[in-house]
Amino acid sequence: MSTKVGFYHLVLWPLEKALPALVGKAYASDLKVVIMAGSAERVAHLDTLLWTFEADSWLPHGTMRDLDADRQPVYLTDGEENPNAASVLVLTDGVAPSELDAYERCLVLFDGKDDAALAQARRQWSAWRQQGHELIYYQQTEQGGWQEKTRTGPPPDGIIATD
């Protein structure tokens, strides 16, 4: 199975503003989401964020501490589990799962002002392109929306794309 991977180049907004907006769209579409962070501390930070990002709004979610993780529409983890059978994976902190095929969509959020984050996103792009995933690069607009800049589909059967 090929996963559609969107690379979201954060230029104007920090992760703390972009993440709730993107996950909120998935939730509004009745899609289940797994958010993978780089550490348990980051999971705790994102957990608080999803409860408090706006004074009158929040996203229902659970974390790796929850016993009923399978019932959560949004699940935060620093591991590779998918207990809620999510179809959408959101990657933060430069993390990458060993396998993308369990998901229909993957969103890679990376800080465009961080050289290490840019380099990691480029490595992920190359690796996942060679694996045949459809890749889409989005850049933030001045209004805070997302503009598609580049797209690459899976290579034809039997052909592996190279850079």
Image (tube, helix red, strand yellow):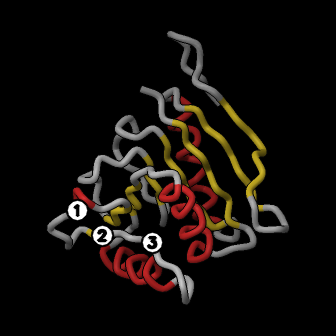
Instruction: Quote the CA–CA distance across marks 3 and 2.
Output: 10 Å
Q: Which residue is mark 2?
A: 62
Quadrant housing residue 55: bottom right
**Residue 31 rendering spot, x and y as whole percentages:** 44, 50
Q: Residue at x 65, y 41 (%)?
A: 136
The residue type indicated by label 1 comes to Ala
Q: Which image quarter holds the N terminus? A: top left
The residue type indicated by label 2 comes to Gly
Side (left or right) of 20 relative to 45: right
Tell me if residue 81 comes above or below residue 52 in the rendering: above
Instruction: Quote the CA–CA distance across marks 1 and 2.
Output: 6 Å
Earlier along the polypeptide chain: callout 1 or callout 2? 2
Q: Which residue is mark 1?
A: 69
Q: Which residue is mark 3?
A: 59
Q: Secondary structure at mark 2?
A: strand
Q: Residue at x 45, y 38 (%)?
A: 104
From where the camera sits, is residue 84 visible?
Answer: yes
**Residue 12 rendering spot, x and y as whole percentages:** 75, 72
Number of residue marks: 3
Q: Residue at x 53, y 52 (%)?
A: 107
Q: Which image quarter holds the C terminus? A: top right
Side (left or right) of 134 relative to 63: right
Side (left or right) of 147 relative to 127: right
Q: Are marks 1 and 2 in contact (CB under 8 Å)?
A: yes
Q: Residue at x 41, y 55 (%)?
A: 33
